Image (cartoon, helix red, strand yellow):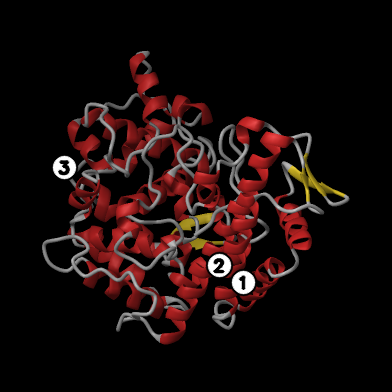
Amino acid sequence: MLAPENVKPSRRRLTLGLGRAVMLYNEAAVPGLGGMWFIRQAALALLGIRVAEESPHAGSKIEVANAIEALACWIGYQDRGWSRGDWRLRGPRKLKSLHDRGMEQTFRRLKSPSSYVTQPMRMGCVEALPGLGLVDASGSRFNSFSVNVRGQQLIDAVFGERGRGQRYLPDYLRDWVLDEPVKFTGSLRGKLNPTADAGDDARMVMREALAFPGAGAERRRSALAWMRRIDAGDDFGATPYTDWGNQPAEIEDNHWKDLRAGAALLQTRDAAISVLANIEQELVAHSRLDLTRKLPEGVATSMEVWRKEAQRFLALDGHGPNEAAAAAREFCTEALQSNVHAIMMLVSREDHMLRVTGSVVVPTAAWRTDAALPVSDAAQAGSDIEPDAEGIEDSAPKRAERDVLPPSISPRIIYLRRLSLDLEGRLGRFIEAQGQY
């Protein structure tokens, strides 16, 4: 639903102090899934951990996993003739630049942050690997993870087991990270390519992981059953659910209410961002906004929408994890104050490019007119997944995916839908079909 704040030259991310609340609502939606949405995403991250464990002097687990993912995507793009469109591949500009310059696919080069995207797919697995019982973790950071028996089963299922006469990919990658010469044959490339089918054995391991016992196992199971029904039959989205008043039979009452509350918070936050966008456009035109005077039409109209969404959230009786619900209620209550107080508190939550002096909203020293939020694009400033640093197609939920689900539902439900399709061997066809929209 939301992600940590990120500031970019032309677009910035706004959490409005709600980052942890939204994280908790996301966790309540599909516990333990994080940002994982296809089997090979998890397998590549596990492979990085395993190779780093076997080659401790090569680099940290993060460095090794990032480099292996970059190598896999490089191979995936080469096999596609550098055409884009498959969400399972990242970083075409940087990798294509290396390719065009005749650079070799060495570990030393690919572990450099400048060679690959700043937010690799591995990052989406930080919650999923321990949450689904694929690693043993001494902490919450990726470098603290250690591959366990189930994680090794997934590595072997996706990349091939050890055996006489077989090419065991992790052994080649261990040599690769130690800068020893490795020829990546067609067989090895096929095993590394993120767009290749994971295989039936890997699907079986992932199904078992999704059933990993714990507080969230039942919610994962029921949500997965719901996603399967949505895509039952030959057509994707054959049984859409777009109405929050129509609770699926698979989802129990408290789970559904948590999903509704999380979506209502997102809609309220997006409405608040629209208020900020209108304020910033006023600053572009007049350099200041005097709150003691009648509000400009755009600001006033967006304030009404913000209040309406806040009241809708409050009417849901604060469902969701206690900490998240309390933070959300506080935020929504602020919207119901007078215009002056509501805007002052909202500007305080923005806390970067705007400030209030007396009763006047003015820019801070960080203000840039080219970074002002455009009104038509305001909701994107708080969208659930950060757009790729290179401005290309990424794993963010697409409009067509959202169209078959209730408005503003947690992206974890969308990720689970994709994973459900991967478990059926249909994800590649789904991605191709989505590209037609």
What amino acid is found at the position of numbered circle 2 in the picture?
Leu
Marked residue nearer the N-terminal end (3 or 2):
3
Residue 368: image location, x then y, percent: 68, 32
Asked if residue 189 is positioned above or below residue 22 in the image, the reply reads: above
Say which of marks 3 and 2 sits in front. 2
Q: Which of marks 1 and 3 is in front?
A: 1
Residue for badge 3: 165
User: Is 32 left or right of 346, judged from the image as shown?
Assistant: left
The front one of 185 and 364 is 364
Is residue 140 in sight in this rendering?
A: yes
SS at mark 3 in the image: loop
In the image as oriented, which residue stretches furthest toward the left? 234
The residue that appears at 52% across and 63% down in the rendered structure is 267
Percent coordinates x, y for residue 232 in the rendering: 17, 69
Q: Which of 355 and 31 is in front in this view?
A: 355
| Residue matched to label 1 | 324
Which residue is located at x 42 percent, y 79 percent? 256
Task: Point out the residue furthest to the top here.
Answer: 101
Residue reaching furthest to the right: 358
Q: Residue 265 carries which label?
A: 2
SS type, badge 1: helix
- Asked whether disc 3 touches disc 2, contact meaning CB atoms under 8 Å apart, the reply is no
Residue beneath the point at 46% across and 84% down = 254
Amino acid marked by disc 1? Ala
Q: Where is residue 102 in the image (x, y as percent from the top left)?
A: 34, 14
Dot 1 or dot 3: first in sequence order is: 3
**For the residue carrying disc 1, how many other residues have a C-alpha within 10 Å: few (<14), some (14-19), or many (20+)?**
many
Residue at horizontal 52 percent and vertical 51 percent from the top: 379
Q: Distance between the residues labelled 1 and 3?
A: 54 Å
Q: What residue type is labelled 3?
A: Gly
Q: CA separation, marks 3 and 2?
A: 56 Å
